[in-house]
């Protein structure tokens, strides 16, 4: 209750801060904000008219209208599909009325007549509400943790269709730079580009114009704390839909959450990974080691001797399991997004108070240099975004830290805590850290060997677990007798 | 004379600094230095044996030997093809004896028997000596300007063949980070890779093994000063040679010099461009506007609304003019490398004393963020290097500044000096700035219209200059009457 109030106040102050900030905004963002206002305002001549004329001042008024509009909207019927839209940072990119209509059409099972079509409509509508909820929840939680920093809310429209909401906090007390970005874009793509959007591309049947209607939406965030002992966190959850000429829809989810510390705290790594693992267990426990390995294999600075960006987490793409509905797939994504704050927030709270030296700060700056290298040289999303005409560079590069550093051939002294981190980055450990240093539970009870645990059955013995699962955990099965003594090395 | 002595002292101190630095060096660089030592040391059992055993300490001895070895070499016959090898930062990558032998074979026109083959051998040998000279001259000049900073000399070998010498100064009094890198690599390439090395690729006739022997060598440098009023400078001059099955050699030069200031000083821009233009004039004056435009078109952050990285300079690639010998082409490169210090040094001297504010420093940090973006996202050489297995990342990323900064949607206030720079970066001006703001001389006298100035003839009138040359200078010929009033806008 108290916390909700605190957030309420936060929002109010933030809107004020936003108005002040607007005077110094880039003209283009003023335009964007005006567009955002139009998007969020009931299209009466009043709102439209006001938003249509003038520059910065109007854009401020415009955003004011936008926020009020969404507030009015919320006041009347704040909840849609169980999502409380009054906690969102801004009005949804797709007009809330349009989303509501789509839901009603679904409920009346008259979808085929609706201009949004049938099938995955509910999934799409719910995903847009979900990413808005995640943005709101994360921004409010970071503002709570920081105590001082406020998010700037920046709405923008994409000429080709859709738009987004970029929330950025800079120079907070705890967070040096944090960005949480929602984007919902739609339009038509040439098949080649459509295939490129998908890591396992396959031929898509385009319409007579040779184009494919698509919808892409997601929430992505990078959080760079001030204190070198608080890890940087990144998460991104996205949904793609491509409509083929025969009306069939090709859809998939992608995403992940991963942690990038400057100093290794096994407890933090353990907590982070176990929280993600638990979130996935009810859906399909065998996915965790797969997604965990995918993360270890993706966030790699190959040009730095395959040094990992961080201590991992999970990463997945093209997620549309055979025979599963969009709703079922979405439920996994929902669990993973619900796990973001529980996975990260406790780590921030227990490390943000640690005092640090100039050397530790400098080490953080060097690690941020590596972060920049990965994002600009290797990250598929960033490269695709920067090369796409009309994409919004400021939202894409929101992921870069406020400051970074490069020294020629810097190498921490052997045995130092800095060197300890590098070891893990160069050879990822098994990261289901168990509090009490037991063998990974999944290995002990063979939970993974048959995709799910034998409910009620006695735990299997360690050597019942198939070797292939041991290999997933980088555990040499021939040495398993000695493993307990060697836990620290996993 | 005095300066030479100063340099002598500088070298001595630097070697001392180097020995101290070695204790903290990465093991791998210790290995590299040991290899360097072997490369530079007469392969007697003594030198070889000592260099072959032990780690860091030996590598220090190794380098000591290397330096001494080259010194001994110099003492006997320091000059080769007119290049004083005693001014080099380290022994040449190709053993000096081998280079000498190649030259003698040339002189005795018995090249066909030499294992280096005939034809462009002299060009290749001289290019290696030239890039070593440039490295030495620039390092010594930067040490002179800095007064405190010393270059670390780091020799390295490339397993596939060849190696390099990386000189880095960090945390100097004037230069925050400066790197001057020489590399001479050779080996065999698949035709695809060979073609990729060349921007205008064309089919090459490979040997029975389907591979093409190649040699690639160059000197590249990025100099990041501490003071925001002193511009960053980059230069790079390179030579490629690919041998086809029929023995014919495909060769070309590439390179350029460009300036990246944080604040616009027209005098500096004018001086820099005119120095380069003058260096090219004796060879082929019509090349300057072409190479200048190439530079403006290459160093562009397309993802930042085509913002240029800096105020330009020259850039060229695939330079092997029809019917010209390697020697003739090399003479242009020689002039351009000789122009590096005269183009940059006076600018450093007249700006390094300016006091600057925290805001100016922060602006510099933001501009460095853009520098990082260009190098990691767009620069062909960097991308090619980072993706090439076995390439030396530390030498490639030597170009990155010590520190950089990214702020969400930072935009300097209209009319500020920061905004003035952005204007020029977003719309490159005609950059043959004339001291007295006259129209560009080349435009006035039609010097470019026929490739060279009509010696002795009266200057042509402005309107004699063909429109196509005006367009090169972004001058609208229909408005030329008004141009003089509007010079500032060029």
Image (tube, coloured by chain):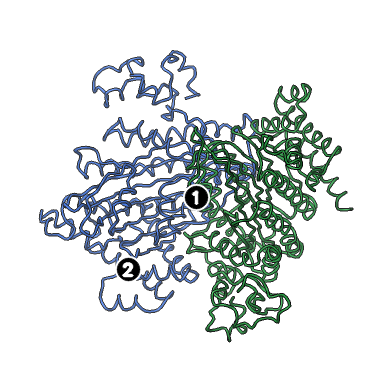
Chain colours: A blue, B green
Between the C-alphas of marks 1 and 2, the distance is 59 Å
Say left or right for B288 vs A347.
Answer: right
Q: Give the quadrant of residue A199.
A: top left
Q: Which label sits on residue A318?
A: none
What chain is tagged by disc 2? A
Decide which of B425, A435 is in the foreground and name it: B425
Say left or right for B228 vs A323.
Answer: right
User: In the picture shown, does residue A69 fall above or below B202?
Assistant: below
Residue B370: x, y in percent? Answer: 55, 57
Q: Secondary structure at mark 1?
A: loop
Which residue is painted at 37% across and 64% down in the image? Answer: A156
Dots 1, 2 in contact, CB < 8 A: no
What chain is tagged by disc 1? B
> Local crowd at mark 2 within 10 Å, few (<14), some, or many (≥20)?
some
User: In the picture shown, does residue B199 fall above or below B466?
Assistant: above
Residue that numbered label 1 is attached to: B201
| The C terminus of chain B lies in quadrant | bottom right
Residue B428: x, y in percent? Answer: 56, 69
Decide which of A124, A340 is in the foreground and name it: A124
Q: Secondary structure at mark 2?
A: helix
Q: Are marks 1 and 2 on the same chain?
A: no
Residue A182: x, y in percent? Answer: 36, 55
Given this view, does label 1 or label 2 mark the residue nearer the observer? Answer: 1
Q: Give the quadrant of residue A360.
A: top right
Which residue is painted at 70% across and 71% down in the image? Answer: B267
Q: Which label sits on residue A68?
A: 2
Decide which of A99, B56 is in the foreground and name it: B56
Say left or right for B203 vs A464.
Answer: right
């Amino acid at each position: 209750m108290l916390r909700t109030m605190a957030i309420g106040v936060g929002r109010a102050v933030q809107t004020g801060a936003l108005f002040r900030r607007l005077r110094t905004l880039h003209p283009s963002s003023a335009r964007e904000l005006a567009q955002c206002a139009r998007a969020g305002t009931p299209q009466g001549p009043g709102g439209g008219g006001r938003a249509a004329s003038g520059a910065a001042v109007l854009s401020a008024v415009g955003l004011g209208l936008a926020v009020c509009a969404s507030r009015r909207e919320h006041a009347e019927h704040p909840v849609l599909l169980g999502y409380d839209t009054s906690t969102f940072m801004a009005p949804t990119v797709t007009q809330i009325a349009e989303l509501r209509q789509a839901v009603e059409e679904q409920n009346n099972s008259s979808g085929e007549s609706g201009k949004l079509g049938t099938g995955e409509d509910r999934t799409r509508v719910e995903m847009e509400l979900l990413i808005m909820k995640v943005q709101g929840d994360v921004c409010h939680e970071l503002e709570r943790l920081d105590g001082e920093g406020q998010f700037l809310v920046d709405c923008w429209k994409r000429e080709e269709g859709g738009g987004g909401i970029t929330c950025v906090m800079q120079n907070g007390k705890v967070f040096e730079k944090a960005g949480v970005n929602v984007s919902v874009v739609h339009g038509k793509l040439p098949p080649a580009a459509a295939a490129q959007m998908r890591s396992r591309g396959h031929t898509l049947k385009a319409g007579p114009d040779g184009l494919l209607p698509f919808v892409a939406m997601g929430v992505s965030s990078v959080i760079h704390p001030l204190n070198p002992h608080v890890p940087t966190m990144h998460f991104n959850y996205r949904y793609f839909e491509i409509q083929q000429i025969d009306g069939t829809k090709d859809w998939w989810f992608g995403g992940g959450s991963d942690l990038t510390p400057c100093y290794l705290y096994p407890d933090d790594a353990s907590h982070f990974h176990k929280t993600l693992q638990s979130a996935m267990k009810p859906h399909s426990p065998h996915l965790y080691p797969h997604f965990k390995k995918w993360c270890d294999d993706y966030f790699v600075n190959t040009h730095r001797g395959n040094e990992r960006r961080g201590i991992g987490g999970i990463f997945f793409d093209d997620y549309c399991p055979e025979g599963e509905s969009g709703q079922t797939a979405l439920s996994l994504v929902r669990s993973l997004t619900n796990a973001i704050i529980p996975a990260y927030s406790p780590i921030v709270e227990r490390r943000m108070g640690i005092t640090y030296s100039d050397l530790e700060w400098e080490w953080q700056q060097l690690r941020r240099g590596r972060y920049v290298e990965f994002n600009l040289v290797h990250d598929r999303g960033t490269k695709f975004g920067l090369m796409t005409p009309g994409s919004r560079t400021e939202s894409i590069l929101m992921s870069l830290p406020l400051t970074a550093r490069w020294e020629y051939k810097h190498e921490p002294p052997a045995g130092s805590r800095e060197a300890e981190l590098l070891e893990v980055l160069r050879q990822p450990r098994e990261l289901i850290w168990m509090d009490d240093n037991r063998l990974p539970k999944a290995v002990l009870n063979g939970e993974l060997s048959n995709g799910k645990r034998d409910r009620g059955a006695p735990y299997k013995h360690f050597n019942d677990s198939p070797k292939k699962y041991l290999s997933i955990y980088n555990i040499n099965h021939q040495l398993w007798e000695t493993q307990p003594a060697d836990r620290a090395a996993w």
